[in-house]
Amino acid sequence: MAIRTIEVREPVMARNNEIAAAVRARLREAGVPAFNFVSSPGSGKTLLLERTLAELGSELRLAVVTGDVQTQNDAERLARHTNHLVQAVVTNGACHLDSRQVETALAAIDLDETDLLFIENVGNLVCPASWDLGEEAKVVLFSVTEGEDKPLKYPPMFHSAGAVIVTKTELAAAAGFDRGQALANLKRISHHAHIFELSAKTGEGMKEWIEFLVRQHAAVRAKEVRAIPATPPVSKRE
């Protein structure tokens, strides 16, 4: 008997991309750049967002959509640092957010009263790489405790990044982190991305990150075609 294969992924992805394009157009029209934060679990996304809200919240109006597999813990942590909306999306087991969830979350966000939108994706370096959420750029995090070869292990995710953040730099010496090798691996895979090295715990490197976000907001408000340049600088510390 002949075997017939039914492909369901392509139609699902096509519909996701249609919604993502509509979300992106809506955000650009409102002058609100969105950044999709992705990483493996425990790399420090929530702590970085907490620190970012605390340091930038008095200058720009920040809204957050945070996705988690089961709890609203991250949303509750972030809500303590902003008077603007923190929207929780519980995926109930799904390993990533999709554009429909972001579109639904936008219904509760007043874009006229928002300057930047942060999307905290589910902790996963595989699935989110393929799902466009309508963001201006993906921001990929990896901590010094995860090893220098993380970009080589997950090239689709790191190649999709508009910015890469090496986190928990205060632990670099204790973890035996080889900074030179890590940057070489990043340049190989994420050669087009902005690269930041910071500690959300101590504040080291946060100034450059905050300045980057302010520039992206200004670029989108000015209706520039690309908020993130195609050939950004590699590292502030070299």
Image (cartoon, rainbow, N blue to C red):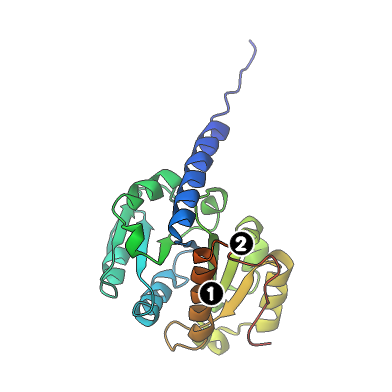
- Crowd band around label 2 with a 10 angstrom C-alpha radius: few (<14), some (14–19), many (20+): few
- Residue 121 seen from this side: no
Q: Which quarter of the rendering shows the N terminus?
A: top right
- Residue 81 seen from this side: yes
Q: CA distance from mark 1 to mark 2?
A: 12 Å
Q: Residue at x 70, y 82 (%)?
A: 180
Q: Position of residue 103 (x, y in %)?
A: 39, 47
- Crowd band around label 1 with a 10 angstrom C-alpha radius: few (<14), some (14–19), many (20+): few
The residue carrying mark 2 is 226
Q: Amino acid at mark 2?
A: Arg
Query: Where, by quadrant of the figure, is residue 80 drawn?
Result: bottom left
Q: Earlier in the sequence, mark 1 or mark 2?
A: 1
Q: Residue at x 55, y 83 (%)?
A: 175
The residue carrying mark 1 is 215
Q: Residue at x 58, y 68 (%)?
A: 163
Q: Disc 1 on helix, strand or loop?
A: helix
Q: Position of residue 27 (x, y in %)?
A: 45, 55
